Image (spheres, rainbow, N blue to C red):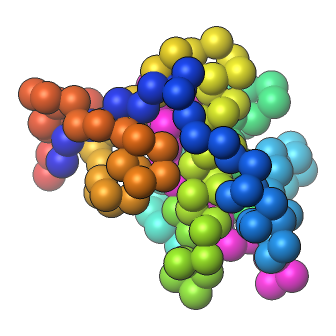
Amino acid sequence: MFDMLVRLYDLPDAGPVLAAAARRVTLRRPRDEERGALVDWVGRTFSAGWASECERAFASDPPSCFVAIAEVGIVGFACHDCTRRNFFGPAGVADAWRGQGLGAALTLACLAAMRDAGYAYAIIGGVGPAEFYRRVCGATPIEGSTPGIYPTA
C-alpha cells in the first residue's frame, strides 16, 4: 500500500460536513477518562495495532485524536501524530455507521487540527481507501512510498 499527501493549507471547508455529522453524533476530542474505553473499542472493532496507536494519542495534550459518540456509544475515531509525527491515522467508523459522512467528518477534524498545529502537509500512511481520501481532502499518492514505514508480514 502507498502513502498519500494532503495539502493542509488547502483543505476544503469542513463546516458543512461537521454540521451534518453533529446531527447524528457528538464529534470531539476524547477526555482522559475515556482513554480505556476508546482504546478497548478500537482494539475490538479494528485491531490491536490500531489500539496501540490510539493509546499513543493520549500522550499529547490535548489528545491527538477525535471520537464520534452516538447514543449507542463510540462509533468512530481518527488520530494524528501517533504512528509518526505529521501522519494522519489510524481512523475508522463502525460498520453500521459507515456511509453517513462520519469518516469524512473525523478525517477533516483531525486534518484541521494538524493544520492549526502548524503543519503545512499531512501524510496518510499505508492507505486503504485511496478514493475516499482523494474525495474528502484532496490527498494525492506519494510516488515511491510503497511499502512505506509499516512492516510487511
Q: Is residue 139 left or right of residue 45?
A: left
Q: Position of residue 41 (x, y in %)?
A: 64, 68
Q: Residue at x 29, y 37 (%)?
A: 140
Residue 82, above or below 51: above
Q: How many marks?
A: 0
Q: Is residue 110 left or right of residue 30?
A: left
Q: Residue at x 62, y 26 (%)?
A: 114
Q: Residue at x 61, y 45 (%)?
A: 108
Q: Position of residue 101 (x, y in %)?
A: 61, 68
Q: Position of residue 94 (x, y in %)?
A: 57, 76
Type of secondary structure dominating the magenta stretch: strand
Which residue range is magenta in the image? 70-91
Q: Is residue 13 left or right of residue 63?
A: left
Residue 139, above or below 28: above
Residue 84, above or below 55: above
- Residue 74 belongs to the span the image colors magenta: yes
- Asked where in the image residue 12 lies, by quadrant, the reply is top right
Q: Position of residue 107 (x, y in %)?
A: 57, 49
For this rendering, which residue is in front, 31 or 121?
121
Residue 108 shows in the view: yes
Q: Is residue 57 left or right of residue 7?
A: right
Residue 57 shows in the view: no
- Residue 139 belongs to the span the image colors magenta: no
Q: Residue at x 31, y 58 (%)?
A: 131
